[in-house]
Image: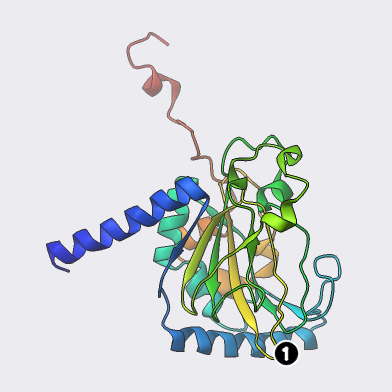
C-alpha cells in the first residue's frame, strides 16, 4: 500500500469514527461485496434449516410480534461465515474505537425481516445489559447488511440523539414518530452504540427480505449473553487464536486489562521502601 493510499484509508476511518462519536452510529460502505453478502445469506438459510432440525425455533415471540421476523442464532460449527465476520478486522477496529481496547463478543445472530414483519420493542442494547444510569458506552453493534436496508423493507429504526440518554425517563412520549431508518446497501457495515435506542422496522414490501447479521460486542468487564464455552465445540475452540479466544472468553481467567495495573507492588512504587 502506497503512502497516499494509506493516508486515504486512515482518513476514511477517522471520519467514520468521528461520526460514530457524535451521532452514536456510522455506516461503512461496501465492506463486503454484494456477491459475498448474497452468498452469506444463502448459507444462513441453510443454517436456519439445520437449527430447526435441532429444535431451535426461528420465531421468538418474546422478541417479535409475528413469525415473519426470522432469528438465526450463532452456530459456528455449521459454517465458518460466523467466525469470518465475528473477527473481521474492519469491524473489530471500529468497535475498539467505540468501546476502547479489548472488546469481547457477547452475541452474534441474524435477523431477517420478511414481508409483514412488525416492530419489536423500542430498546437500547445497553439497557438490556446493565441498569442505568448509562453514563458510558459499554456496547457496540456491528450490523452486517446482507441485503439493501431501507424503511420499506423493515430497516432498523433509531431515535436520533438517544445515545446520550442516561435514563429511560429521557425517552420522549412520542418516540415512535421520531424514529429514523438506517439506509444502507448490501455489503455495508452499520455500527451503532449500545446506548442508541432503536427497534426493528415494519416490512411493507410484498416479497422482499431485509437481512442483517448483528455482532454484539461489549467492554471486557461485562458478562457475555452467550456462553461460548458451552456453545462452541471443544475441537473448534482449540483452533482459535489467542486473540479469538480472548474475544470469546474461552480461557479460564477473565480479562483484567480494562483499567488495570497488575504489576507487583514494588514495581508500582519503585521509589518507596516496601
**Rendered view: 128 above or below 169:** below
Query: Up-down: is 84 above or below 8?
Result: below
Q: Which element is circle 1 on? A: helix
Q: Residue at point 52% right, 68% down? A: 86
Q: Position of residue 87 (x, y in %)?
A: 47, 66
Q: Is residue 108 left or right of residue 122?
A: left
The spot of residue 162 in percent (x, y) is: 62, 46
163 or 216, which is in the foreground? 163
Q: Residue furthest left?
A: 3
* Residue drawn at x 58%, y 46% as measured from the top left: 161
Q: Is residue 199 above or below residue 102?
A: below
Please indicate, yes or no, whether residue 86 appears anywhere in the rendered image. Answer: yes
**Residue 58 coordinates in the image, percent (x, y):** 78, 80
Residue at x 74% of width, y 83% of height: 51
Q: Residues within 10 Å of mark 1 (few under 14, many from 20)?
A: some
Tell which of 176 and 162 is nearer to you: 176
Is residue 76 visible from the viewing direction of this image? no
Residue drawn at (72%, 90%) of the image:
49
Q: Quadrant of the N terminus?
A: bottom left
113 left or right of 161 in image: right
Quadrant housing the C terminus: top left
Query: How does the figure colour the protein chain or chains?
Result: rainbow
Number of marks in the rendered image = 1
Examine the image and state in which quarter residue 89 appears.
bottom left
Image spot of residue 108 (x, y percent): 62, 67
Q: Is residue 109 above or below residue 21?
A: below
Q: Which residue is mark 1?
A: 49
Amino acid at each position: 500500500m502506497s503512502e497516499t493510499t494509506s493516508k486515504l484509508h486512515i482518513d476514511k476511518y477517522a471520519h467514520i469514527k468521528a461520526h460514530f462519536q457524535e451521532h452514536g452510529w456510522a455506516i461503512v460502505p461496501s465492506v463486503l461485496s454484494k456477491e459475498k453478502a448474497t452468498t452469506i445469506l444463502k448459507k444462513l438459510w441453510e443454517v436456519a434449516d439445520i437449527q430447526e432440525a435441532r429444535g431451535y425455533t426461528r420465531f421468538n415471540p418474546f422478541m417479535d410480534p409475528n413469525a415473519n421476523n426470522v432469528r438465526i442464532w450463532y452456530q459456528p460449527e455449521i459454517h465458518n461465515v460466523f467466525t469470518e465476520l465475528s473477527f473481521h478486522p474492519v469491524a473489530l477496529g471500529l468497535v475498539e474505537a467505540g468501546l476502547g481496547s479489548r472488546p469481547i463478543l457477547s452475541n452474534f445472530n441474524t435477523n431477517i425481516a420478511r414481508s409483514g414483519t412488525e416492530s419489536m420493542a423500542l430498546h437500547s442494547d445497553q439497557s438490556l445489559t446493565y441498569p442505568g444510569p448509562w453514563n458510558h458506552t459499554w456496547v457496540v453493534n456491528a450490523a452486517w447488511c446482507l441485503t439493501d436496508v431501507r424503511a420499506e423493507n423493515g430497516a432498523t429504526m433509531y431515535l436520533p440523539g438517544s445515545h446520550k440518554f442516561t435514563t429511560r425517563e429521557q425517552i420522549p412520549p412520542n418516540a415512535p414518530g421520531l424514529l429514523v431508518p438506517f439506509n444502507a446497501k448490501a455489503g455495508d457495515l452499520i455500527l451503532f452504540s449500545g446506548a442508541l435506542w432503536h427497534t426493528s422496522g415494519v416490512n411493507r414490501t410484498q416479497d422482499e427480505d431485509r437481512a442483517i447479521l448483528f455482532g454484539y460486542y461489549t467492554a471486557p468487564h461485562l458478562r457475555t449473553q452467550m456462553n461460548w464455552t458451552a456453545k462452541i465445540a471443544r475441537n473448534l475452540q482449540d483452533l482459535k487464536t489467542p486473540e479469538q479466544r480472548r474475544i470469546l472468553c474461552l480461557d479460564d481467567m477473565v480479562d483484567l486489562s480494562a483499567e488495570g495495573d497488575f504489576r507487583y507492588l514494588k514495581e508500582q512504587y519503585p521509589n518507596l521502601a516496601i
